[in-house]
């Protein structure tokens, strides 16, 4: 439901809808990515490991080897296990390989050791032990089967978490220390869950996105107290669930997105 100007609802039309309408098929397994309104694309994986894309195909975002927008799902060849969608899109196949595409390859965001945009998936390196790709933004975040986290892309704002400043961009994946189960990346900050349930954040903290009770930016991961089971990052805001079932939110709150009956930001702590 919602806006549908570029066919992002997958209904074979561009009609806006104010109530839920089913996307054709009954074997959908993973909603792998929804880009923001500037891009308007969608990716999803079915239970047979087929990958499908639809919506606005702004600058090759869909990976369909063209720049055509589609109002109904179109298949991307191969067998896939995870996918994300943004200016640089990333996905893993069932054989453990990592792939990327899109126009957003400035500073190596696709992990291809170059700055070339692509309109269809290309394999990143030759490794076959990738478990899944994390939510991407302008960087790559891929996790391997041993829990190691690898990042690539621009280092501005400390996005890579490698304690390096601007000019230390990485165009191919480099390991971020620790054992990780999930990772998240937004336009200005990054975060991840380690396998021990600890939650860590890094990069921009101008809106309190890192949950440190301050606005100090961090170029390497800093821990947010507690043990956590799930977390989701949005535009300068985070929602996370602790292992005891408590729901926590912090960061920007200009539209009341923190659910606190106010519009005051929360810096954590």
Image (tube, rainbow, N blue to C red):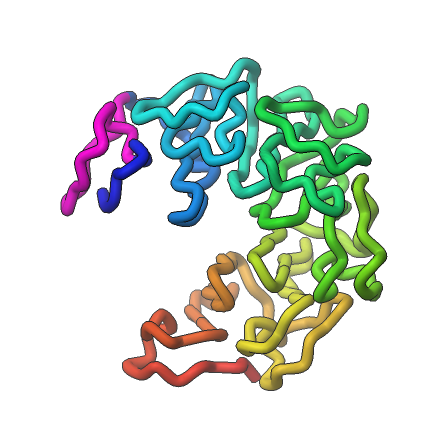
Residue 25, x across and y down, in percent: 29, 21
In depth, the one of 157 and 133 nearer the eye is: 157
Looking at the picture, does residue 25 appear above or below residue 190? Answer: above
Residue 117, x across and y down, in percent: 65, 32
Residue 120, x across and y down, in percent: 59, 22
Q: Quadrant of residue 109?
A: top right
**Residue 15 part of the magenta-drawn span:** yes
| Left/right of residue 207 with respect to residue 169 in the rendered view | left
In depth, the one of 17 and 39 nearer the eye is: 39
**Residue 107 part of the magenta-drawn span:** no
Q: Residue at x 22, y 32 (%)?
A: 14
Query: Would residue 49 be visible to someone looking at this image?
Result: no
Q: Residue furthest top?
A: 77
Residue 269, x across and y down, in percent: 57, 84
| Left/right of residue 260 with respect to residue 86 in the rendered view | left
Q: Residue at x 38, y 73 (%)?
A: 258
Q: Quadrant of residue 57?
A: top left
Region in magenta: 9-24
Query: Considering the image in quadrants, where does the N terminus appear?
Result: top left
Count of numbered marks = 0
Looking at the picture, does residue 15 appear above or below residue 260? Answer: above
| Left/right of residue 226 with respect to residue 7 in the rendered view | right
Q: Residue at x 61, y 85 (%)?
A: 214
| Left/right of residue 258 with respect to residue 146 in the rendered view | left
Predominant SS of the magenta segment = loop
Q: Residue at x 28, y 81 (%)?
A: 261
Query: Would residue 24 be visible to someone looking at this image?
Result: yes
């Amino acid at each position: 439901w919602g806006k549908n100007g570029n066919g992002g609802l997958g209904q074979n039309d561009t009609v806006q809808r104010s109530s839920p309408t089913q996307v054709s098929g009954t074997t959908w397994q993973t909603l792998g990515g929804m880009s923001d309104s500037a891009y308007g694309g969608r990716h999803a994986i079915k239970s047979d490991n087929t990958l499908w894309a639809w919506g606005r195909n702004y600058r090759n975002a869909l990976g369909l080897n063209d720049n055509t927008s589609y109002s109904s799902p179109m298949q991307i060849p191969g067998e896939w296990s995870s996918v994300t969608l943004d200016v640089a899109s990333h996905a893993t196949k069932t054989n453990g390989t990592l792939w990327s595409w899109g126009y957003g390859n400035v500073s190596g965001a696709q992990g291809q050791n170059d700055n070339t945009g692509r309109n269809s998936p290309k394999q990143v390196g030759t490794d076959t032990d990738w478990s899944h790709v994390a939510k991407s933004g302008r960087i790559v975040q891929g996790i391997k089967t041993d829990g190691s986290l690898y990042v690539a892309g621009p280092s501005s704002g400390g996005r890579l978490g490698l304690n390096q400043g601007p000019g230390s961009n990485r165009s191919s994946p480099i390991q971020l220390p620790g054992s990780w189960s999930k990772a998240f990346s937004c336009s200005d900050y990054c975060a991840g869950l380690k396998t021990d349930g600890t939650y860590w954040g890094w990069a921009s903290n101008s809106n309190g996105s890192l949950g440190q009770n301050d606005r100090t930016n961090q170029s390497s991961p800093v821990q947010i107290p507690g043990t956590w089971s799930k977390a989701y990052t949005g535009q300068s805001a985070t929602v996370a669930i602790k292992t005891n079932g408590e729901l926590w939110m912090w960061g920007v709150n200009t539209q009341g997105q923190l659910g606190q009956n106010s519009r005051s930001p929360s810096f954590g702590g």
